[in-house]
Structures are given as structure tokens and as C-alpha cells.
């Protein structure tokens, strides 16, 4: 029995084309990628090589021109628009370079937004948002408007929003691109903690020194993968708390079997 985490994302022969005929250009070309639950992937590569396009497709914000995209073994093209919206809210958390907080909503309401699909009533959603903000040391700023926060604080609020609904996949597009090195480090420590809880993170960065946090580093070039290096074995990836007992049991059983042999 395999002890590895399951495949959560699979891209096969994926292409994203803009324009037609002589004017056609490819943001992604024959792109293949398999992501296991618990990976922390950093994507690097020159401007225009397709990094944002890739994240947008994985996050169901964009669709490929051709090829297959499987999310938890389900073909994304078969998922209805309605369910896609639910998945974006519940299963996938987005973090952007420019934070993308809604300017005329207080921080707490920004963070509570993805809980719209949770079935909680508004007070419960705000309580939950407040709890998460406390984890990010932003409790005393929860009723501030986004413009009243520093860049680092806004990004921490944006991460709080990305994880409030307990998503399994976090997609981050240069989340530290607009931050000074201290704020950058705080943001990375948060992502590290979220990853250690068994979540899957795919992050785009131009900063080579951040790859120390990754379990896998992919360099892209002209819409394809140039290099792909795993620094942590699949069997050593973190496991979600809910699955930990199950995995421990399987490990024990396999050990027993082996010692009997
Ligand atoms: N809506 C669009 N119409 C036409 N071409 C597009 C469109 N969106 C993206 N592209 C092209 O697709 C390619 C990949 O863009 P993408 O934004 O994914 O690059 P990136 O790797 O994220 O770059 P950066 O590091 O600058 O953010 C680029 O050549 C870009 O011009
Ligand atoms: Mg980009």
C-alpha cells in the first residue's frame, strides 16, 4: 500500500493560446504537471513565461485552450460554473501580489467573504474572521479599512482571507513582491505554518532565496517546464491533521507485515 499523499492536481498536455494563425502566441504549451497533496511548489521564470496563466487555470479563474486539468481526479471542464464558484471559495485560497482587498470593506468583512458559501449566518462568519485575524496579529486592526494598514499587514489580512474557509490548495502569485524583507519573512512564516498543516501551496516568486521554504522548485520558460526539482520526497510531505491517524495506522500495518516476512 502506498504511503504517499494522493494526487490533488493533474495537468496533461495543457495549452493556453492567445490569438489565431500567424498572430497566435502560447502562454502555456504542452504543459504537464502532477501535484501531490502537501507539496509546497515554487514557480520561477522570466516575465511572460506563463506563471500567472498557470495559477489562474489551476484556480479555475481561466480555462485552457486544450488539454486536461484534473482537480481531485475530476475533469475541471466538466464542473459547472456554479460548482466552480463554490470550489473557488471553499477549496482554493488565492493570494495576489497587490493584496486585492476590497477597498471599501473593513478588514474583518474582507476576511469573512469566502465564508459566504459556508452556510454560517453573518455574525458567525465575522466571529470566524476575527479568530483568524487574531492568529495573524491583526485583531486590533480588524475594523480598519485596507488603506489604513501597511503593505505587510494588508498581505497578512489577504492570507487570512485566503485560508479562512479552510481551503486545501493555496495559490499565491508573488505574494511578497510588494513587501520589504521583514514583512516578506512574516508572510513566508505564515505560509510555512499553513503548509505544515498538510495544505498544498503553489507560489510564484522571483526571489530565489525564498525557495528554501519549498518542497519543489519549478523553473518555467516560454510556457513550459524548464527544470523541476523536488527537495522533499513525496512520502515525507506533511499530511492533513484529519488524515494523520489513517496514515499512521497504515504505516504500522506495513511495518508489521514487513517484520513478519
Ligand atoms: N489576455 C491576454 N491576451 C493576450 N496575451 C496574454 C493575455 N494574458 C496573458 N497573455 C500573454 O501570455 C504570456 C504569459 O503571461 P503571464 O501573465 O502568465 O506571465 P507571467 O509569467 O506571470 O509574467 P510576470 O512574471 O511578468 O508576471 C505573456 O506573453 C502575456 O503577454
Ligand atoms: Mg505574473
Image (tube, rainbow, N blue to C red):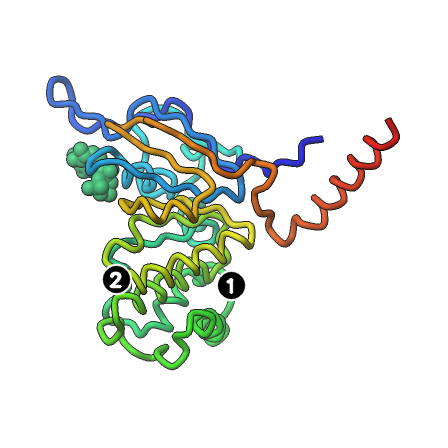
Q: Secondary structure at mark 1?
A: loop
Quadrant housing the C terminus:
top right
Q: Which mark is residue 180?
A: 2
Give the residue at the far top of this rendering: 21
Residue name at image x 33 percent, y 48 percent: 209
Quadrant housing the N terminus:
top right
Query: In the rendering, at what x and y percent does residue 134 appear?
Result: 45, 74
Query: In the rendering, at what x and y percent does residue 159 appear?
Result: 38, 60
Image position of 25 with respect to 151: above or below:
above
Alpha carbon separation for disc pair 1 and 2: 38 Å
The answer to which of marks 1 and 2 sits earlier in the sequence is: 1
Image position of 119 with respect to 36: above or below:
below
Counting other residues with Cα less than 10 Å from the Cα at mark 2, is it few (<14), some (14-19), or many (20 or more)?
Answer: few
Query: In the rendering, at what x and y percent does residue 8 appear?
Result: 51, 38
Give the quarter of the image for residue 47.
top left
Image position of 102 with respect to 231: above or below:
below
Amino acid at each position: 500500500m502506498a504511503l504517499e499523499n494522493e494526487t490533488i492536481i493533474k495537468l496533461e498536455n495543457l495549452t493556453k493560446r492567445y490569438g489565431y494563425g500567424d498572430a497566435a502566441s502560447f502562454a502555456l504549451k504542452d504543459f504537464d504537471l502532477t501535484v501531490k497533496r502537501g507539496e509546497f511548489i515554487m514557480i520561477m521564470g522570466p516575465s511572460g513565461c506563463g506563471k500567472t496563466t498557470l495559477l489562474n487555470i489551476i484556480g479555475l479563474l481561466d480555462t485552457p485552450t486544450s488539454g486536461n486539468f484534473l482537480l481531485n481526479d475530476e475533469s475541471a471542464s466538466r464542473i459547472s460554473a456554479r460548482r466552480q464558484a463554490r470550489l473557488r471559495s471553499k477549496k482554493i485560497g488565492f493570494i495576489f501580489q497587490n493584496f486585492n482587498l476590497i477597498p471599501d470593506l473593513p478588514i474583518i468583512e474582507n476576511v469573512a467573504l469566502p465564508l459566504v458559501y459556508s452556510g454560517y449566518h453573518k455574525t458567525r462568519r465575522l466571529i470566524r474572521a476575527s479568530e483568524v485575524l487574531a492568529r495573524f496579529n491583526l485583531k486590533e486592526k480588524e475594523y480598519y479599512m485596507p488603506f489604513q494598514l501597511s503593505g505587510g499587514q494588508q498581505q497578512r489580512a489577504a492570507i487570512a482571507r485566503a485560508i479562512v474557509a479552510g481551503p486545501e490548495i493555496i495559490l499565491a502569485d508573488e505574494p511578497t513582491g510588494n513587501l520589504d524583507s521583514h514583512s516578506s519573512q512574516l508572510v513566508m512564516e505564515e505560509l510555512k505554518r499553513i503548509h505544515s498543516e498538510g495544505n498544498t501551496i503553489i507560489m510564484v516568486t522571483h526571489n530565489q532565496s525564498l525557495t528554501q521554504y519549498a518542497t519543489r522548485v519549478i523553473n518555467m520558460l516560454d510556457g513550459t517546464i524548464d527544470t523541476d526539482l523536488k527537495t522533499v520526497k513525496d512520502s515525507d510531505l506533511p499530511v492533513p491533521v484529519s488524515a494523520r491517524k489513517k496514515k499512521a495506522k497504515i504505516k504500522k500495518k506495513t511495518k508489521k507485515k514487513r517484520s513478519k516476512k
